[in-house]
Every structure is written in structure tokens, then in C-alpha cells.
Image (tube, helix red, strand yellow):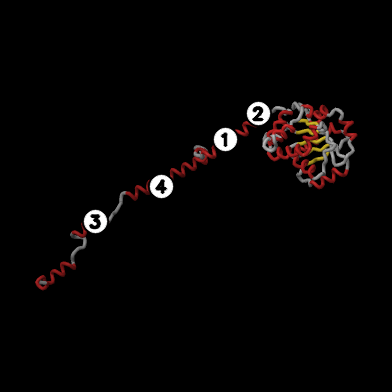
Amino acid sequence: MGDDLGEEWWAHDANSDPSDGEETEVKQPTEKPNTDTKPKRKAVTEKTLKARKKRKSEQKEGSLPQETEKDKPAKATKKRRKKKTITDVLSVSEPKPGCPADLQNLVTQYFSDKMSVIEQEELKLQDSCFLSSNDMTHTLSSYLKQVCPKWAKIHKQHTEKSSVILLVVCSSALRTIELIKQLTTFKGAAKAIKLFAKHIKIEEQVKLLQKGVTHIGVGTPGRIGALVEKEGLNLRALRYLVLDWNWRDQKLRRMVDIPEVRLDFLKLLQSGILNGCREDKIKLGLF
């Protein structure tokens, strides 16, 4: 049968056009897949990029609000509000002069979970333990002249080394220097010493106290307490303890509003000040 077909069959098969017939019809749908989608996707991408660039440029120029300000998380907003609340309370609160009850409440709160009820009763100070408080109209010198009217006689009678008869307690080294300058018109011939930790070693202060008679000590509760603990400063001759109670720093904090200073101050009171007050040897003043 292959011979009957002759050479025409082979010629027909070899010269046939592959694009004809059923095979061509099957391949036609796959030659141009998704020809309509590619240009659209590219056009959308370019448009989006232009819009983003335009928005960024407008944000830099200030014509549009920053996204970071608009879409801040809730947690960050809470933190910001908390800080603002603290600042507002300090800035809008009217300054009120301190009184003995303020100090008594501070002492009671601190020792409430550290002592028994009976021991806490022993911490309470009588009104006679306190000097008159500053009504915020006095300078330090004028206040001390009011509460220590016999200062000239008292400081002449003091001859004991490593001790003082007047302690002024404040919150920082800078405040110490300011207060010593304010003492000029009050102290007269009395000698004053700076008692703070910044740039002054405690050993140097111990030597200064041992070298001669000192009448007034001005400093921070941390350094004063350390000197008392090391026996570089004794409290036997102490008659007046004045607290820089009403002064506020740049953050509007009083001495007792600063946690570390408050803690040092309460420890200093516990080191012998409160006992001296109850025995009527030490008078407390809130400046």
C-alpha cells in the first residue's frame, strides 16, 4: 500500500505548512497571553510613585500634616499625656509656704511600713520643736535673723571642732553656693562651710571640720549624712536645722520632691535629728 501512494504522499507531508490545520488553531490562544493587563499595571505603578513623591515634597514644605503626628500609636500618646500632666500640675500649682504639718506627714508616710504603731507615735514632734516657718517673703539672712535673734552671742560661745551650731539643708551643690552667699549679712564673724559631694572629697571636708571651729554648715542631706556616719561631723552642738523647703528647681521640684534627696534627708533625720528635737536640743525651721 505504501507503493500505491507514490512519492506524492511524502512530498505533501514534507511541504505542508505547520500553521495550517488543527495544530495551528490550538496554538493561537497561547501566543499573546494577558496582553491587555501589562500596560495597565505599569501605568498604575508609575502614577502611584508620582503621587507618593508629590506627597513627600508637600510634607517637607509643610503644606500637609506629617503622617507621624497623625498616626501615632496609642501607647505613645499615653506617655506624652502623662508627662504633660505632671508638668501642668507643677506649673499651675500655687506655691504655698511649708509648715510643720508638711514635714510631720512626710516622716509619717516614710516610716509607716518600717515601724510599729508605737514606734511611729514616738516620731511625732511637738509644735515647740519648730521655729516659725518662712512665709516666702524672707531671704535666708532675714529669716535667720528672725528665728535666731541671739546669734551673735550663740556663735561666740561655740568652741567645739568637727561640729556646727546651724545646719542648712538643701537639694544640690549649686543651691548650697547660692545660700552661702545669702548668709553674708547674717553670719557676721561666724565661719560657714560647704557640705556637698560635687568636686569635694569627703576626707577633705573631715579635715576642714577638724582644723578649726565651724559655726554654720550648708549642704545636701546625702553628704551631711555621710559625714555624720563617718563621725567627721557630730551633732552634739547642733541647735538649729533649717530646711530649704520652699525653693523649687528648674523642673519646679522642691527638695522633698526629688526621690534620692528625700530619701537621704529622711535618713539624716533618723540619724539623731529627731531624737535631738524630742529632747528640745534642736529646733527645726522650714525656709
Give the quadrant of residue 268: top right
Q: Nearer the viewer, residue 274 or 44?
A: 274
Q: Using residue 52 as the reference point, say whether residue 195 is left or right of it.
A: right
Of the residues shown, which amino acid type is indicated by label 2?
Ser
> Could you tell me if the residues under marks 4 and 1 are in contact, i.e. CB atoms within 8 Å?
no
Label 2: few (<14), some or many (≥20) within 10 Å?
A: few
Dot label at residue 81: 1
What kind of element bears circle 2? loop
Of the numbered discs 2 and 4, the one sitting upstream in the chain is 4
Circles 1 and 2 in contact, beta carbons < 8 Å = no
The quadrant in which the C terminus is found is top right
Q: Nearer the viewer, residue 179 or 132?
A: 132
Q: In the picture shown, does residue 73 fall above or below 129?
A: below
Residues at marks 3 and 2, CA–CA distance in whole angstroms: 85 Å
Query: Which is closer to the viewer, label 3 or label 2?
Result: 2
Distance from the alpha carbon under mark 4 to that under mark 1? 41 Å
Q: CA distance from mark 2 to mark 4?
A: 57 Å
* CA–CA distance in space, label 3 to label 1: 68 Å
**What amino acid does circle 1 point to?**
Arg
Q: Quadrant of residue 89?
A: top right
